[in-house]
Amino acid sequence: MDALRDAAGDEGGAGAAAGGAGDTGARDTARPGDTAARDAARRRDAAVRAAVEQGLLDSEPLVCLLDTAGIRASAAALTGAFAAATAPGTPVLHAFAAKASPLVPVLRLLADCGLGCEVASAGELALARAAGIPAERIVLDSPAKTTGELREALALGITVNADNHQELERLDALIAAAPTRSPIGVRVNPQTGAGAIDALSTATATSKFGIGLRDPGARERLVRACLDRPWITRLHAHSGSQGLPLPLIARGVRELHALAEEINAAAGRRQVDTLDIGGGLPVNFASDEETPTYAEYADALREAVPALFDGSYGLVTEFGRSLLAKHGTVLARVEYTKATGGRPIALTHAGVQVATRTVYAPAAWPLRILPYDAKGLPKTGPPVAQDVAGPACFAGDLLATARDLPELAPGDLIAVPDTGAYFFTAHYGYNSLPRPPVHGFTADPPGPVRFTPVRPAQTTTEIVAESGGALRDALL
Ligand SMILES: *Cc1c(COP(=O)(O)O)cnc(C)c1O
């Protein structure tokens, strides 16, 4: 029933133990992924302990941690995999999907690693600009862009991917009124089918995103729309997020490439010069191993679309989850424990506000729970099936049900790894629970773990202000 029960018992604490004296022989035979996973677990253990020792949890019962070295390593793996796959000189832009981690210092860090930014709202665009990302490295992709948003994007020169024919007609008018240097693309829906999670599958027959290619007459209409608009130079597809098998993503990219070839043949020139292949590389939530890898993804693409990397098209990618998920950890205090109906329950400060999808759709979004004691040391002990509950006032606010863990006690800590994308960065304001602080950390032995604030804790004063506090009498 609990998909991660077995995995949870082996990670974190046990990972730290494996990093000790008994581990030296195993390391020589380990695959590179194993070593990276063990290093990540070791850095996390060090950060948890340092968070306690340095008092991060003294004033807050809930903090979020970002492993700077891990983020840099993922960015390097992405750029390296595509650099190895593409013909020399091929322009490649990796635009990080801001919604996965809409934090200015994160966007800035990724820019420092050579990435750009994919945005889908005025807020995300403002974050990308605040991070100092240049316009030519920003891609705007929302399905419901207002005229104002389009006008701003065209004035800035950022790339715009239109979602539908009506948006193209808006662009006709805006471009006629004011010429732009923005590259413009069209999002297509290859209608290649769903992955394991319906809500995150964007290439279904009826997905709300892009222009469907398989509907009767749709392909011909789209080709015509492109031929009529010489300024359309890009095609975009993003088949979905988490739960998509690599061959399914690759099939969508193959459809995209075939459409570009068709348009260019009909135009008699290379009108489409860039393919934006979206993001969607799935993340392994069951252990610290980062799988599938970007290199495996590049291999899957090369197999499905051999011509993709031959240099005839520039490439844009839009990865989000796979760049950040493994590098974020929620760390929460166990406030109380009890047993009800024979079930031990740990009441913690991590719940629906930081793990919304897990709480509302636990089967699709299982998370590991790593137990630590009050000193921040991995907690060991015989497994006891426990519920790990959050602080929100509804019964379903559970991060794990009947999870085998050493019996938790008040003052213990739970770490929830793999939460660096779409979890604590997508705060849910239920019960006016505050956004917890986010700290970046570096853990390079022999030096101490160093924390740096990335996002301050939301204060109760801010909650009151954002809740109409200055408008107290407005409804009288
Ligand atoms: C969400 C999204 C992405 C990122 O998806 P990940 O699964 O986080 O890699 C990329 N492109 C578009 C258009 C998106 O909506």
Image (cartoon, helix red, strand yellow):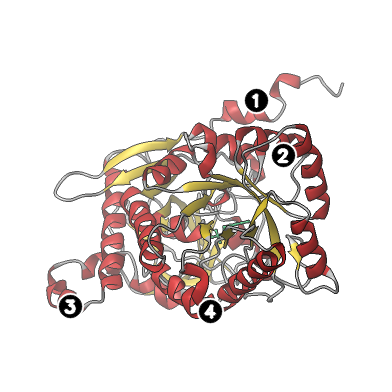
Instruction: Kindly identify the residue that appears in the image at 40 percent across and 57 percent down.
Output: 89
Q: Around disc 4, counting alpha carbons within 10 Å, would you say few (fewer than 14), some (14 to 19), or many (20 or more)?
A: some
Asked whether the residues under the numbered discs 4 and 1 touch, taking CB atoms below 8 Å apart as contact, a structural biologist would say no
Q: Residue 53: x percent and y percent?
A: 26, 43
Asked whether the residues under the numbered discs 4 and 2 touch, taking CB atoms below 8 Å apart as contact, a structural biologist would say no
Numbered tag placed on residue 26 in the rendering: 3
Tag 2 or tag 4, which sits nearer the N-term?
2
Tag 2 or tag 3, which sits nearer the N-term?
3
Task: Give the SS element for disc 3.
Answer: helix
* C-alpha span from label 3 to label 4: 36 Å
Task: Give the SS element for disc 1.
Answer: helix
Looking at the rendering, the quadrant in which ligand 1 lies is bottom right
Residue 302 sits above or below residue 62 on the image:
below
Q: Residue 258: x percent and y percent?
A: 64, 72
* C-alpha span from label 4 to label 1: 53 Å
Q: Please tell me whether mark 3 or mark 4 is closer to you in this view.
A: 4
Q: Which residue is mark 4?
A: 304
Q: Amino acid at mark 4?
A: Ala
Q: Is residue 443 left or right of residue 184?
A: left
Q: Amino acid at mark 2?
A: Leu
Asked whether the residues under the numbered discs 1 and 3 touch, taking CB atoms below 8 Å apart as contact, a structural biologist would say no
Tag 3 or tag 1, which sits nearer the N-term?
3
Task: Give the SS element for disc 2.
Answer: helix
Q: Residue 164: x percent and y percent?
A: 78, 55
Tag 4 or tag 3, which sits nearer the N-term?
3
Q: Amino acid at mark 3?
A: Ala
Q: Around disc 3, counting alpha carbons within 10 Å, would you say few (fewer than 14), some (14 to 19), or many (20 or more)?
A: few
**Residue 1 visible:** no
Q: Please tell me whether mark 2 or mark 1 is closer to you in this view.
A: 2
Q: Which residue is mark 1?
A: 465
